[in-house]
Image (tube, helix red, strand yellow):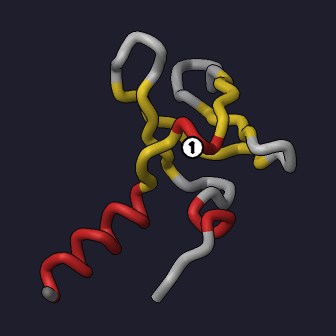
Amino acid sequence: MTMTRDKLYMNGKRVYFVDRFGKVQSGKVVFDRADGYFTLNMGGRYGTPQVIAKTETFTTRKAAEAAAKASSED
């Protein structure tokens, strides 16, 4: 099953990315913008927002599970 890039970033999906300090961060997609960016809920008491480019992400939770399943079938 091939997932399009848009399906990976549906609202509510957890996205992992590396911030400018080299630390892996994660957040849930809240709003997907048409210009290649989206807003994440980074958690915290008030749901701290973070805007990142889609090119900065390296995995999503569902995509990581699918990749692990595909590699175990080989």
Residue at 53%, 28% in the rendered image = 43
Residue at 18%, 76% in the rendered image = 71
The percent position of residue 12, horizontal first and vertical second, equals: 61, 54
In this rendering, the answer to whether 50 lies above or below 60 is: above
Residue at 43%, 45% in the rendered image = 58
In this rendering, the answer to whether 72 lies above or below 31 is: below
State which quadrant residue 66 falls in: bottom left
Residue at 45%, 35% in the rendered image = 17
Q: Is residue 62 left or right of residue 29?
A: left
The percent position of residue 5, horizontal first and vertical second, equals: 61, 64
In this rendering, the answer to whether 15 lies above or below 25 is: below
The percent position of residue 36, horizontal first and vertical second, equals: 76, 44
Residue toward you, 43 or 58: 58
- Badge 1 marks a residue whose secondary structure is strand
Residue toward you, 11 or 45: 11
Residue for badge 1: 28
Q: Is residue 9 left or right of residue 24?
A: right
State which quadrant residue 30 falls in: top right
Residue count near mark 1 (Cα–Cα under 10 Å), binned few <14, some 14–19, many ≥20: many
